Image: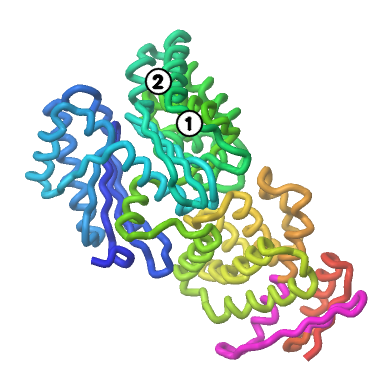
Amino acid sequence: MHVADQPLAIVDLGSNSGRVVVLRIDPSGHLEILGDALRLARDVGNGGRLSAEAIQRTVDALKDFQAIAVGTGARRTIAVATSAIRESKNADELLQRILLQSGLAVRIIDGEEEARYAFLGAIHGIQANDGMVMDLGGGSLELSRFRDRALIESWSLPLGALRLSDQFLTSDPPGESEVRDARKYARRLLDERRMPPLEADEELIGTGGTIRNLAKMDRQARTYPIPRLHGYVLTRRRVGDLAQSLLSRSAARRKAIPGLNADRADSIVGGVLGVEGAMDALGAGDMTVSNQGLREGLVYDAAGSPPPPPEEVRRTSIAALAHRFTSWDAGRADQRARIALRLMDTLEPEAGLKAGERLSQAATILDIGRSIDYYRRHEHTADILTESDLAGFSHRKLALLAAVVRQAGDEKMNVRAYRPLLGPEDRRPVARQATFLAIADEIELRIAPGKALSVACEEHRRQVIVHAPLFDGYRQGLLAARFYRAFGKRLVFEP
């Protein structure tokens, strides 16, 4: 089977959860999720031997996972078990029962493999070039150092959320001495590995259910413009605030915290201490959260797909999103992008590659909002951008892209709508790029389908002449007035 174009089911059996995800790598290289199911079961691998009840629950869950895999069209299933199962004394009994009752062969992976798969999954969808990936599970903590998006070293430590909670935090809420002992234990294990701290140009990437849950709690406690978690930046200071809040509450009160999965109310206290310890050991001031991890890494590994450059990830991700919408036309999108970039090259040759990439993306993706409402397509496109599964974009990049699209349709849109990601310094570049996009959109609208057009643009003193199809004088006047506000120059259209 050619993995790159066939649905593949991944089953991940961990310390307090089992999960199946059915995915497919589409022709552009973008990872598409076809199905997903989670089962939380704290007693799986809770030290020593697995009970008969725990084994049966796990077998039943795996049988259900197989049904989901078949139902969503998976042609192959890869099943792995991590630290909880590999440390259980009767793991072989569990795996044999699973094989007999579900036909599924589960492979136990070691800490090094776990770290490598987590790295592959996390780095594919994040724009970082150098740094560390941290994957905090229920039983273990995996850390992977990478350079130029290639793995160079990894570590696996027994610092999982459940392990720390069960071993140290037995009171409800945890006592001061328990918290102190857990922190000392985490620090000692991290110091023993002698991991070098992050350098100035390196980033920390976090993945795993505990880290995503912490990020979700933090995001919901703020006024924040991007709904999705992927790419969210969680600072060390705010991790400390979360730790203080979580450790001071009973499990029952923790369940009421917005953003916290109630099933993680017990283990989250150990998890936040593990995250704190790792960030301190690495000297990390913040951490970028990845929605992808071990399961996605297994798919990329099966496909033999190494992490591509961030700009390639963004390009294929934009293309994959656009192709989901019937209103999108590749030819018209390409023509709109060429016109917009020609305008930018003439008027702002110093704008740089990042600005050009953003303008091209905005011009390419603009029409997807028409599938919802033509008259509000800019607004809908911007909303889709911030809520979709686009990979390779930081939240700031997403906010800038959405602001350009939205302001192209509504000049009065203020970048303050995207605080704290955008600030006053972004107003001018956003306004200018939105103006380029608005002009390109008007010109492209008047070009017959399938007909190529070369738009010429020249500047004479305080006047810019655009050689393009003429259109209604009223629209010309509106665009000229907008252009003058953005550039302080007259805009003239000539055939």
The image quarter containing residue 220 is top right
Residue 395 seen in the figure: yes
Give the residue displayed 32% in from the left and 29% down from the top. Answer: 139
Helix, strand or loop at mark 2: helix
- Kind of residue at badge 2: Ala
95 relative to 163, above or below: below
Q: Where is residue 411 in the image (x, y as percent from the top left)?
A: 75, 63
Residue 325 sits above or below residue 211 on the image: below
What is the distance, in whole Å, between disc 1 and disc 2 at their CAs?
33 Å
Pick the quarter of the image with the C terminus.
Answer: bottom right
Q: Would residue 471 appear left or right of 20 to someone viewing this image?
A: right
What residue did someone put label 2 on?
251
Residue 349 lies left or right of residue 94; in this view the side is: right
Residue range corresponding to the magenta coloring: 437-466
Q: In which quarter of the image is residue 76?
A: bottom left
The x, y position of residue 421, in whole percent, is 66, 46
Residue lying furthest left: 100
Would you call the spot at circle 2 few (<14 residues within 10 Å), some (14-19), or many (20 or more)?
A: many
Image quadrant holding the N terminus, namely: bottom left
- Disc 1 designates what residue? 195
